[in-house]
Amino acid sequence: MKDEFLIFFSGRVFALAFVLAASFLAFYSPALRAAERDVDVVKERQALMKDIQSTIGSLSAMVRGKREYNVDSLQQLASEIKADLHQLSSLFDEPSTSENSYANRNIWENKAAFDELFQKASEAIQQLYVVKNEADLRSSLVVLGNSCTACHRQFRLQKPKS
Ligand code: HEC
């Protein structure tokens, strides 16, 4: 009697586990996969943004005389920013956020305005290729920096002060 009960019970447990696993696969895993994808997209986005910021730091070092002003390395750095921004452009296609993201969800309600600000930043980067001297570089960096801020003000959430 006891054994029968155990067999009956373990059969039930097995069936229940099976049903749970199946429903997990059917309903939860696509959602989980989407959440994982979002975490990756956010990480990639933040890494590229940081990379751009540090490349701009190298350019401003040229303006401040901390790094030799040189057209070849200027253009090399401009190309790095351009490539990063190009990679970034597809990382906002889908609404994607995570608990570590500072992307404002209003991006995807105002995607045209967001894309326009993205375009402004691309144009500002394009200007770096025709810079003629340090003074020129300084004003181009101001324009570029303003294009970053314009988007952040509207579409990036404030990081809590630590
Ligand atoms: C069209 C909008 C837009 C433009 C243009 C833009 N950013 Fe961002 N930036 C964002 C958004 C949105 C985030 C938040 C991303 C997230 O956390 O998911 C962000 C995040 C960042 C971060 C923080 C990354 C982190 O680790 O949290 C830095 C640094 C940054 N941007 C630098 C720049 C610089 C420098 C430029 C200009 C060359 C620039 N961004 C241009 C929208 C923009």
Image (tube, helix red, strand yellow):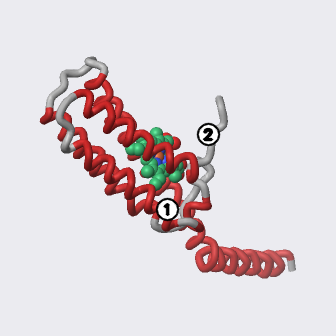
Residue furthest left in the image = 72
What element does badge 2 sit on?
A: loop
Q: How many marks?
A: 2
Q: Nearer the viewer, mark 2 or mark 1?
A: 2
Instruction: Identify which amino acid the numbered label 1 is placed on.
Output: Arg
The foreground one among 91 and 141 is 141
Residue 136 figure quarter:
top left
What element does badge 1 sit on?
A: helix
Q: Residue at x 49, y 62 (%)?
A: 37
- The image shows residue 23 at horizontal and vertical percentages of 66, 78
Instruction: Determine if residue 153 is in view.
Output: yes
Query: How far is mark 2 from mark 1, CA to CA?
Result: 22 Å
Q: Residue at x 65, y 31 (%)?
A: 161
Instruction: Specify the quadrant that holds the N terminus.
Output: bottom right
On screen, residue 88 versus residue 98, left or right, reads: left
The foreground one among 14 and 103 is 103
Q: Is 17 situated above or below 104?
A: below
Q: Which residue is mark 2?
A: 159
- The image shows residue 110 at horizontal and vertical percentages of 56, 65
Instruction: Determine if residue 101 is in view.
Output: no
Residue furthest top in the image = 66
Instruction: Specify the quadrant that holds the C terminus.
Output: top right
Q: Is the residue marked 2 within 8 Å of ligand 1, measured from its CB?
A: yes
Q: Residue at x 49, y 43 (%)?
A: 149
Instruction: Identify which amino acid the numbered label 2 is placed on.
Output: Lys
- The image shows residue 113 at horizontal and vertical percentages of 50, 63
Q: Is 27 situated above or below 153?
A: below
Mark 1 closeness class: few <14, some 14–19, many ≥20 residues within 10 Å: some
Q: Which residue is mark 1?
A: 37
On screen, residue 145 versus residue 127, left or right, reads: right
Q: Is 63 situated above or below 42?
A: above
Mark 2 closeness class: few <14, some 14–19, many ≥20 residues within 10 Å: few
